[in-house]
Image (cartoon, helix red, strand yellow):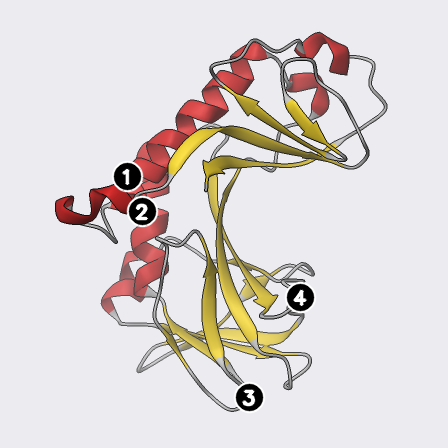
Amino acid sequence: MKSSIVGFSLMVLAPIANASEFVVSYDGFYDRLKVMDKGQYEYAQINFYLVDSVTLEPCEIKSGKLITENNSLPLSYTKHAQLLLPLDKQLDADKAVIVVEPKNPAHECQLKMQIEAPSIKLKQLNTSVINQVNDEFDDLLTNLSGFFIGKLLSFLLPTQKGIQIEFDDEVDIPGALCEAKTCKISMENTIDSNVLVNANVEIKNIVPWIAK
């Protein structure tokens, strides 16, 4: 099965192809988790998912493990194919590898690294929280960019325009750019988050709004 990685174009790890397994070195994850831990963000997270290379739907996992030369540990993951990886200095030092067996071995799975704020509830959403999430995303993107691009290629860095909120139903927020179940909020605009106080919707996720 072919292994590859998607997500932000700057965020590329190095997978190892195998006929029936997805295998990738732990060290790239460790470096990025260390950045997040150092930032001590309240809302922003870096999460890792296995997705189908064609549909980008979750690539369901049958089993997984973390392997070093002398040890093998079970890999934690969710039904949505999110890899729940520890920040473990010893695993990094021992050059651990992550081995995942998909439920469907015919799937071509890719690794998606996502910056997101999945824990925020609708009742928490106000101007202060929106600004904080935007600042945390911006700081995390800036700190992560050093892994990929030097000063000579700084023009390739993504530009964050604001945040993008994904709801479970259609919603309209004055001052935001809303289409169907997604609203993009620029920090240059004033929005009225009070309209959400009694809205019959829930937040599915919040991610950075990246300029194309």
Query: Where is residue 122 shown, x and y percent of the image?
Result: 71, 23
Spatial CA span between label 3 and label 2: 30 Å
Disc 4 secondary structure class: loop
Q: Residues within 10 Å of mark 2 (few under 14, many from 20)?
A: few
Spatial CA span between label 4 and label 3: 19 Å
Q: Is residue 29 above or below residue 199?
A: below
Query: Where is residue 63 shown, x and y percent of the image?
Result: 60, 76
Query: Where is residue 33 shown, x and y percent of the image?
Result: 37, 49
The residue that label 2 is drawn on is 34
Disc 2 residue type? Lys
The residue that label 1 is drawn on is 143
Nearer the observer: mark 4 or 1; the answer is 4
Q: Pointer 3 and pointer 1: residues touching (CB < 8 Å)?
A: no
Viewer-side residue, 138 vs 32: 138
Between disc 3 and disc 2, whose residue precedes?
3
Q: Residue at x 37, y 55 (%)?
A: 11
Nearer the observer: mark 4 or 3; the answer is 4
The residue that label 4 is drawn on is 55
Disc 3 residue type? Ser
Viewer-side residue, 10 vs 44: 10
Between disc 2 and disc 1, whose residue precedes?
2
Left or right of 201 on screen, residue 138: left
Viewer-side residue, 3 vs 175: 175
Nearer the observer: mark 4 or 2; the answer is 4
Disc 4 residue type? Thr
